[in-house]
Amino acid sequence: MKLAIAAIEILSPGLKRFTLAGAELPWAGPGSHLVLQIPGPARVWKNAYSLTAAPNGAYRIIVRRVGHSRGGSAWLHDHASLGDVLEVEAPQNFFNPPRSAKRHLLLSAGIGITPFLAYLQIPGLAYELHHCCKPEEADAFQALLPPGANAVLHTSRDAFNLHELMAKQKLDTHLSVCGPDSFMNIAVTAAKSLGWPMAKIHLESFGGATGGKPFSVRLERSGIAVDVGPEESLLDALEAAGLTPSCLCRGGACGECRMGVLSGTPEHHDHYLSDAEKASGKFMMICVSRAVTPELVLDF
């Protein structure tokens, strides 16, 4: 789709809200995300952003200005203007609230609150939201909450007792977590220690791909070798080489980009593969994961 930037709102020094408008937009429910194609000096970047709202004829997203940005958030914050037209992939949803749950415990940190802003618009949803943020951004996030929201903002993770919060939840509660990997790992560890089954834990990573040591990949079936730089993901490197591997969320959550590993050791950063699958080293999620060894041979 081609969508025009219809509004830009400054929420805080590091947060901007964008309204993207177009004709006959596909319906997008709570938990949906968009992938924007963002122009760069040497190539086009693809970044995924959760929809905070989808009013008729428009989509709304909130973008954090990321330090050491590859180009996506920096371009949107520094160069995007009203009327600019962007290529946008149709919305996908891998984080919709389970309708079978009687209650929802929503945990977020930083920009991870964005999918939950859409959740709070569901009539009659029984939820409890706890959001961790920096003290200087508390007012900005508070202003995003609807009147009467059952939400608590925490400006210190050390003072936020996740274990105690989860221990007092009723058995019919479903846990949904969105935020940086460090926050999500703490939340999942606490839930597992209390016996929460994975079937009642719903995750959406907002860390995306991170950099690391450069490595190379050899694609067995394609006969192509690709170098992956320290500041790009494996998925980015393959796309820059003109390849089109299957992908949807670009955040290690949906499983669409899972690829077989024939040789080498992957470094896992996803929230999709099981612990056993990660330990086997036979598969990896190419959108966020990297390599421990200098080279990987992939079944592609």
Image (cartoon, helix red, strand yellow):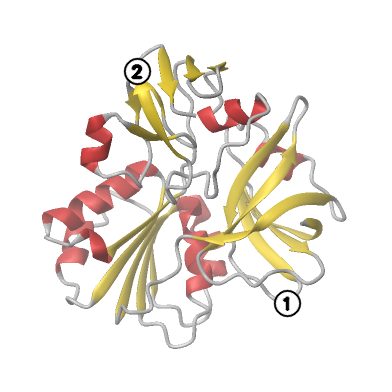
User: Taking 88 as reference, is 64 left or right?
Assistant: left
> What is the C-alpha distance between the residues marked 2 and 1?
48 Å
Residue type beneath disc 2: Gly
Please rate how many residues cluster around mark 1, counting C-alpha atoms within 10 Å: few if below 14, some from 14 to 19, many from 20. Answer: few
Mark 2 lies on a secondary structure that is loop
Residue annotated with mark 1: 56
Task: Name the residue at the front extreme.
Answer: 221
Q: Report the mark closest to the observer, 2 or 1.
A: 2
Query: Taking 121 as reference, is 263 left or right?
Result: left
Residue appearing at x 28%, y 70% in the figure = 174
Question: Mark 2 sits on what residue?
Answer: 264
Is residue 127 visible to the viewer in this orientation of the structure?
yes
Above or below, 227 relative to 266:
above
Judging depth in this view, the residue of 241 and 98 nearest the camera is: 241
Three-letter residue code for mark 1: Asn
Residue 39 point in image, percent of width and height: 76, 37
Judge whether 289 appears above or below 129 on screen: above
**Quarter the N terminus occupies:** bottom right
x and y percentages locating residue 112 in the rendered image: 47, 55
Q: In x, y percent, where is residue 116?
A: 47, 66
Q: Residue at x 42, y 47 (%)?
A: 255
Residue 210 percent coordinates (x, y): 47, 31
From the viewer's perspective, tell me whether residue 292 is left or right of residue 50.
left
Position of 246 relative to 84 (above/below): above
Q: Is residue 284 above or below residue 97?
A: above
Element class at badge 1: loop
* 233 on left or right of 240: left
* Label of residue 193 in the image: none
Which residue is rendered at x = 59% and y = 53% of the image? 49
